[in-house]
Image (spheres, rainbow, N blue to C red):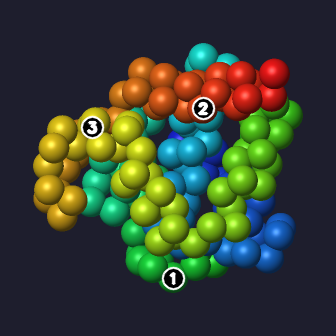
Amino acid sequence: MKSANQVAQGIIGFSHEHGDPISNLKLQKLLYYAQAWHLALYDAPLFGDPIEAWVHGPVVPSVYGKYKAWSWRPIDVDPEEEDLASQARDHLAEVMDVYGGLTAYDLEKLTHQEDPWRNARGGLPPDAPSNNVISHEDMRDYYKARVDGEENQER
């Protein structure tokens, strides 16, 4: 299992390759979706770092701290060479294909409408600070239900 920072390097590299540098806010949401869909599809975490339900959506605190200086601006550093297995790289490419074209704000709004972030916040007002962890079980179950729903619609 890789660290969230290694996965973040993969996402930053992908975004730079496609000419679309990303902000820390967007990076956090893409890390969340990469983890959530990995749990749903493979029943295993992509990385071990916790994801917390902050005001502006899911955040991996260790990665947030590393890129905090960029604030809302695009992260303009060259990513470190990530050492991800081909399955992880393919997974990130799929996540980027689905979510990479959305803005950071669109991704924030999307996560606020979904159960894992809302469940972790436990009824807190939207603007209340929180360090509550979004559980792997909530992510896996929520997104697995979407996979199962799509499969049933195709039949």
Q: Quadrant of residue 64?
A: bottom left
On screen, residue 123 versus residue 66, left or right, reads left
Question: In front here: 14 or 99?
Answer: 99
Separation (CA) of disc 2 from disc 1: 32 Å
Relative to 155, residue 124 above or below: below
Task: Tell me the SS state at disc 1.
Answer: loop
Q: Residues within 10 Å of mark 3 (few under 14, many from 20)?
A: many
Question: In front here: 145 or 63?
Answer: 145
Relative to 151, residue 34 above or below: below
Foreground mark, 2 or 3? Answer: 2
Q: Residues within 10 Å of mark 2 (few under 14, many from 20)?
A: few
Residue depicted at x 83% and y 67%: 17
Quadrant (top left/top right/bottom left/bottom right) for the C terminus: top right
Mark earlier in primary sequence (2, 3): 3
> Where is residue 69 shown, x and y percent of the image?
42, 75
Residue depicted at x 41% and y 77%: 71
Residue matched to label 1: 73
The amino acid at mark 1 is Arg
Foreground mark, 1 or 3? Answer: 3
> Where is residue 63 shown, x and y percent of the image?
46, 53
Separation (CA) of disc 2 from disc 3: 19 Å
Residue depicted at x 28% and y 36%: 119
Residue matched to label 3: 120
Relative to 28, residue 92 above or below: above
Camera sees residue 1 = no
The amino acid at mark 3 is Ala
Question: In front here: 51 or 122?
Answer: 122
Foreground mark, 2 or 1? Answer: 2
Task: Tell me the SS state at disc 2.
Answer: helix
The amino acid at mark 2 is Arg
Q: Quadrant of residue 135?
A: top left
